[in-house]
């Protein structure tokens, strides 16, 4: 088996952290690098958090790059109300010893896509799409070289989480999302419609804690913290592990199902800014540009996640 080459573009975030751990624990994937972007918290923290997570996985060999510190044209909106001040609130956080790479994340994305064989590198955006869109703008030649973009963002039936109409990652940088969705690269979307099915429960969190390992404990404490917000907001049993859905899809795609449809991003309206207008019911003749997921086998997803976190 040759491992699938991926770049994780991320704004950790507890659920981003779990996604990174899942990727680093999975032999099906080769993480070429991790690129940090401003999102859940400012870049100074997301880049540091990415280092913390690599060290937690015992993977100090993974290259981490700092990327864009603000959306393409707008002021950064952050989500400390969900993730806490550090972005990884919950457990006591270590100070990372690992260092960032000297190159900018966008440079790394461009160079990697040019260096590797065309169609062999998958981009995994777990935050606002600023780094990816900037790379596409600076180097349009790389778009055709992307194997696939598997991203967490948007919503159709669940509509929005940061505004009544928009999901956070798309809302923070709608212009970047628009560039990516119009790019012509093959896209798989994990919207809130799917990630809200990846819900933690007490037994699922207990399974992480019961591993008796540092990664298991951290994942349990991160989810404990992250849960309080969604429990209060949705009255749900636990919290959605949004970003790990992206990585789980690469390992076990049959856990998910969806529709190949047209998805466009609202960039003009103040009221619905960042809305992903997904033609789920195929009521237009707009050309399909994304595989938009709608369903998840949640038990299968948590079985995979528990197995892999347990390997760390
Ligand atoms: C997305 O926003 C962030 O808060 C999470 O990390 C996830 O990527 C969910 O809307
Ligand atoms: Ca994220």
Image: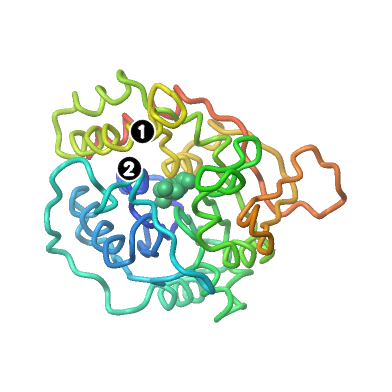
Q: Quadrant of residue 220?
A: top left
Q: Quadrant of residue 202?
A: top left
Residues at discs 2 and 1 in contact (Cβ within 8 Å): yes
Task: Tell me the residue at 48%/59% (across/down).
Answer: 128
Looking at this view, is 273 or 196 the one in front? 273
Task: Tell me the residue at 47%/40% (across/down).
Answer: 245
Task: Tell me the residue at 71%/49% (across/down).
Answer: 277
Residue indicated by mark 1: 305
Residue indicated by mark 2: 18
Task: Tell me the residue at 28%/47% (across/down).
Answer: 84
Task: Categorize mark 1 by other alpha carbons within 10 Å: few (<14), some (14-19), many (20+).
Answer: many
Mark 2 and mark 1: span between their CA atoms?
9 Å
Q: Quadrant of residue 273?
A: bottom right
Percent from the top left, x then y, of residue 107?
A: 42, 78
Percent from the top left, x then y, of residue 203?
A: 30, 18
Secondary structure category for the residue under label 1: helix
Q: Looking at the image, which residue sits at the far top?
A: 203
Looking at this view, is 6 or 104 the one in front? 104
Secondary structure category for the residue under label 2: helix
Residue labelled 2 has its Cβ within 8 Å of some atom of ligand 1: no
Q: Answer with mark 2 or mark 1, whichever residue precedes in sequence.
A: 2
Task: Categorize mark 2 by other alpha carbons within 10 Å: few (<14), some (14-19), many (20+).
Answer: many
Q: Would you say residue 1 is visible in this rendering?
A: no
Q: Is residue 145 left or right of residue 71?
A: right
Which quadrant would the C terminus be assigned to in this image?
A: top left
């Amino acid at each position: 088996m040759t491992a699938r080459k991926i770049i994780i573009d991320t704004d950790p975030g507890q659920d981003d952290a779990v996604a990174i751990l899942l990727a680093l624990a999975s032999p099906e994937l080769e993480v070429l690098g991790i690129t940090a972007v401003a999102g859940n918290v400012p870049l100074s923290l997301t880049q540091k958090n990415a280092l913390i997570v690599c060290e937690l996985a015992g993977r100090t060999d993974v290259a981490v790059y700092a990327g864009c510190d603000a959306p393409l044209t707008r002021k950064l909106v952050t989500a400390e109300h969900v993730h806490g001040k550090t972005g990884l609130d919950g457990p006591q956080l270590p100070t990372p010893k690992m260092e960032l790479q000297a190159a900018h994340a966008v440079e790394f994305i461009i160079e990697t896509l040019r260096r590797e064989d065309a169609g062999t590198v998958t981009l995994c955006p777990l935050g606002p799409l600023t780094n990816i869109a900037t790379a596409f703008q600076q180097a349009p030649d790389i778009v055709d070289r992307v194997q696939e973009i598997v991203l967490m963002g948007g919503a159709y039936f669940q509509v929005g989480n940061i505004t009544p109409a928009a999901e956070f990652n798309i809302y923070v940088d709608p212009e970047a999302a628009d560039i990516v969705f119009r790019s012509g690269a093959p896209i798989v979307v994990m919207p809130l419609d799917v990630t809200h099915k990846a819900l933690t429960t007490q037994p699922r969190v207990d399974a992480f804690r019961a591993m008796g390992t540092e990664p298991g404990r951290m994942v349990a404490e991160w989810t404990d913290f992250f849960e309080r917000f969604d429990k209060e907001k949705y009255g749900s049993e636990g919290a959605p592990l949004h970003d790990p859905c992206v990585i789980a899809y690469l390992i076990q795609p049959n856990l998910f199902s969806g529709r190949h449809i047209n998805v466009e991003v609202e960039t003009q309206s103040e009221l619905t800014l960042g809305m992903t207008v997904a033609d789920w019911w195929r009521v237009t003749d707009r050309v399909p540009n994304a595989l938009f997921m709608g369903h998840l086998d949640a038990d299968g997803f948590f079985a995979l996640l528990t197995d892999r976190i347990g390997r760390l």
